[in-house]
Amino acid sequence: MKRTLYRILPLARLLALAGAVLAGAGALAQVDPYGEVNRLVRAGKLPEAQGKADQYLADKPHDPQMRFLVSTIQSASGKPEAAIETLTALTQEFPELPEPYNNLAVLYAGQSQYEKARAALEMAVRLNPNYATAYENLGDVYAKLASQAYGRSLQIEAGNTQAEQKISALNSMLAPRAGAGRQAPGK
């Protein structure tokens, strides 16, 4: 009988450990609210994603990552002003984070507010000099500003063929993305 008990105890410990690991894995799956909200956004279930985000933020209202995701939901839902408000609040409360500046700039550029977009992107790259997406978006904004400057030149001096050629080259370069910069992905 003693021999059987010794064999059963290690097996019982192993089963208990396996149960604990599986329970922990289940808990981890439920603990990743960011992944769940991101999944819902990617699936186009924006009201459900907003509901999950709101539920999470009820307990942790200052969580920057979830608030960032809320701005993504707002933008995808066609509410750019709400997204701008959310991102602006994030830049004020967490000025060290470059991603809200980048996404704020994308929204500003979508509204043809290129000077605001430029300022936000310059802040993003100042905060993270290795932020490739922000640099790409900044290049697009500079190109749009250049196009506007060449356009103004044409208003002053009609028939300026160099300005016309430059506008044409910039327009063809920017055409595939037409003012839509790349946003930082939800975290």
Image (tube, helix red, strand yellow):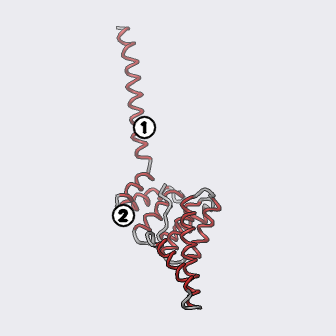
Question: Which of the labelled discs sits on residue 24, or is there none?
Answer: 1
Residue drawn at x 47%, y 74% as measured from the top left: 172
| Secondary structure type for disc 2 | helix
**Image quadrant in which you'd find residue 54:** bottom left
| Residue 112 at x, y percent in the picture | 51, 78
The answer to the question of whether label 1 and label 2 lie on touching residues, with beta carbons closer than 8 A, is no
| Residue 42 at x, y percent in the picture | 38, 58
Quick check: 55 above or below 157? above
Question: Which of the labelled discs sits on residue 158, or is there none?
Answer: none
Foreground residue among 59 and 109: 109
Residue drawn at x 36%, y 60% as measured from the top left: 48
Q: In screen coordinates, is 179 left or right of 117?
A: left
| Residue 53 at x, y percent in the picture | 43, 59
Q: Earlier in the sequence, mark 1 or mark 2?
A: 1
**Image quadrant in which you'd find residue 41:** bottom left
Residue type pointed to by label 1: Gly
Residue type pointed to by label 2: Pro
| Secondary structure type for disc 1 | helix
Image quarter hosting the N terminus: top left
Foreground residue among 169 and 29: 169
Residue drawn at x 58%, y 91% as measured from the top left: 157
Quick check: 157 above or below 41? below
Mark 1 to mark 2: distance in Å?
29 Å
Quick check: 65 above or below 118? above
Residue ID for mark 2 = 47
Q: Residues within 10 Å of mark 2 (few under 14, many from 20)?
A: some
Foreground residue among 163 and 38: 163
